[in-house]
Image (spheres, rainbow, N blue to C red):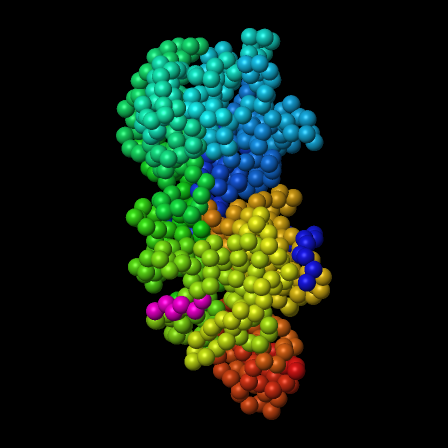
């Protein structure tokens, strides 16, 4: 096969308003996608004079904008595309030029760069790269001890950007880039030289600001002394963060420090002055509790009362961790320059979105037999256990088949947590040959590795999955992914194994004694080849272009989405683009887990995405329209179908099916076929010819469709 390319593509629009409730409370931002390592800034998104919340998730490289509405922050994905596309590692918004609009400071491979906010109420958010040298890089510069250099810091660090010397312009503090644990002060001389703050003129005036050294967790050396550990001068081995606050109202900046290997913030009191800092005292932690692992602190007016508050969240960028997601909010009852911080919960923003930790994987079936689709979401781990233990959450649809509303009803479906599994990826397929949907899931075990499990379905809505999990496939690495599709058209599901190298292998399915097994068939199906940048690639069949045939959709670990039309003979993949609204393209995140499902009675399925960040997003095809009121949707594909394979039936209403031959004989019955689900029927036992499929709908009425089986 030829090497896969990507052409123009298919557009999908965000659908953020399907209700979801947890613990009796309706979530304000259920479909915002989750958070793993969020960084917090405030800025005016809509130029109404009120500061909104702007998050950057370090793990997924996503900007998440939230507009302030009273005392609430509401997810506003329409602003995502108005931010620069090159944001990476860390993002802080600061107004460096005093025009009342927050500018962007962010990481680059050469240090950091700045985007000047040149937007307005008429044109919306717009940005201009500071000191732009395009197409060459435009890093922020500083005067070193001998020459002009890049203002460099480690990619895992977060700097302090603040008016350190109280002269009216913003200075920058960073931990030394080339090893060591002292802090460089890059002083801004714009005011001293021009009397204005419309530029940034940095000089590295010291490599040991405050004369302290960060050694290991909770250990500091003062007065320029070496660390009290072997060797005396530890290398800059992990990420570090800085935040400057006047904690005691004396007019100078105290500092908060964190390190990648710690779960606590450390506060140091400035015993010097604003222009000549001196640290000799490690303060008792004013927060009175430890933060998340590798905590980072952000000091902004989150409550909207005119006084800055403190938020603490992890800066650890990995989604595959055994930890509970927390964002600690500390409200300030004092003043900005002499705070009194009081804990106010550890789920700030998180408590208004679906966020189940990390590596969310959604799936849908009509579990309770009420005619609408219920939602299941697997995760990596429920956190705060000695070892990772994942689970599957059940969100019951308490709405209808066309106006869904989900309510979490079970935190550990089938008590999978008791099996000590993690990174659980559920899906529903018929793999046992009895026409009942089976519960399939990929999961890891610390001792047994990554395995594919099946719990056979009973067809009884009172107890649809009564058995124990059966292992059906084990030839997987820890980061590999699988999907189950009938690739060769023989009516039996095959397995597509997405290897971490980017290659996808095909294993053909075989049914024996009501159990499926898989045998290796092809090492590089669809010609995707090895691609370490793309990583593990997940493939799923879906009629993307609504032509009645099953196309192929691929999703890679970097967040890439593409589809291959069924009619394609050149193996040219087309891009699938996600938008908040028309012309506002979005990035959904990393380690995406896609499922196509019709929740809204449209003529094309919606795309529901889980991700490494632990949340969910919903998108609908740009060209999709609502089915006319009262009109039932009932389709059969492919039609004609090759003898020995299977047909897929999709109905908007729960139904019973009969296959009838040309002289009226009933050849097969299928009871309790769920609505809005791709229900597959094997036709391997039928000869070539013309047949009829009769559907009797649960709410009354029937419809009959003709289909053809060919040799």
State the residue in front, 256 or 530: 530
Residue 260 appearing in the image: yes
> Magenta includes 470?
yes
Q: Residue at x 56, y 27 (%)?
A: 112
Q: How many marks?
A: 0
> Magenta includes 173?
no
Horizontal and vertical percent for residue 15? 54, 50
Horizontal and vertical percent for residue 568? 70, 63
Q: Is residue 614 above or below residue 653?
A: above
Horizontal and vertical percent for residue 521? 57, 69
Which secondary structure dominates the residues rendered in magenta? strand
Judged from this view, the residue extending furthest toward the right is: 570
Is residue 44 shown left or right of residue 424?
A: right
Horizontal and vertical percent for residue 88? 54, 36
Looking at the rendered image, the quarter that the N terminus falls into is bottom right
Judged from this view, the residue extending furthest toward the front is: 231
Is residue 237 shown left or right of residue 551?
A: left
Is residue 36 shown left or right of residue 527?
A: left
Q: Residue at x 65, y 23 (%)?
A: 131
**Magenta-colored span:** 468-473
State the residue in front, 183 or 682: 183
Q: Is residue 17 above or below residue 145?
A: below
Residue 598 appearing in the image: no
State the residue in front, 99 or 688: 688
Q: Residue at x 46, y 63 (%)?
A: 475
Looking at the rendered image, the quarter that the C terminus falls into is bottom right
Q: Residue at x 55, y 12 (%)?
A: 189
């Amino acid at each position: 096969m030829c090497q896969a390319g990507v052409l123009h593509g298919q557009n999908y629009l965000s659908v953020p308003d399907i209700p979801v409730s947890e613990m009796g409370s309706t979530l304000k931002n259920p479909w915002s996608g989750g958070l793993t390592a969020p960084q917090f800034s405030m800025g005016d998104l809509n130029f109404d004079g009120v500061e909104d919340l702007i998050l950057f998730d370090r793990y997924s490289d996503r900007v998440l904008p939230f507009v302030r509405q009273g005392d609430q922050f509401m997810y506003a994905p329409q602003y995502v595309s108005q931010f620069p596309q090159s944001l990476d590692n860390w993002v802080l918004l600061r107004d460096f030029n005093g025009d009342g609009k927050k500018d962007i400071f962010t990481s680059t491979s050469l240090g950091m760069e700045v985007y000047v906010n040149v937007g307005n109420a008429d044109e919306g958010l717009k940005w201009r790269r500071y000191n732009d040298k395009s197409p060459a890089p435009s890093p922020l510069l500083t005067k070193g001890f001998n020459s002009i250099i890049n203002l460099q810091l480690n990619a895992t660090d977060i700097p302090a950007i603040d008016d350190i010397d109280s002269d009216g312009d913003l200075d920058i503090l960073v931990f030394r880039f080339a090893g060591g644990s002292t802090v460089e002060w890059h002083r801004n001389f714009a005011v001293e030289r021009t009397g204005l703050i419309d530029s940034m003129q940095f000089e590295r005036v010291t490599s040991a600001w405050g004369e302290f050294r960060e050694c290991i967790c909770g250990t500091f050396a003062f007065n320029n002394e070496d660390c009290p550990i072997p060797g005396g001068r530890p290398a800059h081995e992990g990420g570090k963060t800085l935040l400057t606050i006047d904690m005691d109202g004396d007019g100078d900046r105290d500092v908060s420090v964190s390190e990648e290997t710690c779960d606590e913030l450390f506060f140091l009191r400035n015993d010097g002055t604003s222009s000549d800092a001196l640290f000799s005292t490690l303060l008792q932690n004013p927060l009175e509790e430890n933060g998340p692992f590798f905590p980072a602190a952000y000091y902004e007016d989150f409550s909207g009362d005119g006084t800055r508050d403190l938020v603490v969240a992890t800066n650890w960028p990995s989604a595959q961790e055994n930890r509970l997601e927390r964002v600690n909010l500390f409200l300030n009852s004092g003043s900005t320059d002499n705070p009194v911080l009081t804990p106010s919960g550890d789920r700030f923003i998180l408590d208004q979105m679906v966020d189940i930790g990390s590596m969310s994987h959604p799936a849908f079936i009509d579990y309770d037999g009420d005619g609408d689709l219920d939602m299941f979401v697997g995760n990596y781990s429920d956190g705060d256990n000695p070892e990772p233990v994942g689970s599957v959450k059940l969100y019951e649809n308490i709405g209808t088949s066309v106006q869904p509303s989900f309510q979490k009803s079970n935190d550990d479906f089938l008590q999978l947590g008791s099996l000590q599994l993690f990174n659980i990826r559920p899906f529903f397929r018929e793999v046992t040959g009895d026409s009942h949907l089976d519960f399939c899931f990929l999961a890891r075990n610390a001792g047994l590795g990554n395995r594919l499990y099946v719990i056979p379905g009973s067809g009884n809505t009172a107890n649809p999955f009564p058995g124990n999990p059966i292992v059906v496939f084990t030839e997987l690495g820890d980061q590999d992914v699988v999907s189950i599709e009938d690739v060769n058209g023989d009516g039996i599901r095959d397995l597509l194994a997405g290897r971490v190298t980017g290659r996808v292998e095909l294993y053909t399915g075989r049914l024996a004694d009501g159990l499926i097994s898989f045998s290796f068939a092809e090492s590089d199906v669809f010609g995707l080849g090895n691609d370490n940048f793309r990583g593990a690639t997940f493939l799923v069949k879906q009629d993307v272009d609504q032509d009645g045939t099953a196309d192929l959709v691929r999703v890679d670990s970097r967040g890439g989405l593409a589809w291959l039309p069924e009619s394609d003979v050149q193996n040219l993949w087309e891009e699938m683009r996600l938008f908040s609204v028309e012309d506002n393209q979005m990035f959904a995140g990393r380690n995406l887990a896609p499922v196509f499902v019709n929740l809204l009675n449209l003529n094309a399925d919606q795309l529901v995405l889980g991700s490494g960040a632990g949340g969910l997003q919903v998108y609908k095809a740009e060209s999709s329209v609502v089915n006319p009121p009262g009109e039932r949707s009932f389709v059969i594909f492919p039609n004609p179908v090759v003898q020995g394979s299977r047909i897929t039936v999709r109905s908007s209403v729960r139904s019973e099916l009969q296959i009838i031959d040309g002289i009226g004989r009933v050849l097969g019955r299928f009871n309790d076929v769920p609505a809005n689900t791709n229900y597959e029927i094997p036709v391997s036992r039928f000869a070539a010819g013309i047949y009829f499929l009769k559907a009797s709908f649960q709410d009354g009425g029937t419809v009959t469709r003709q289909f053809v089986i060919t040799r």
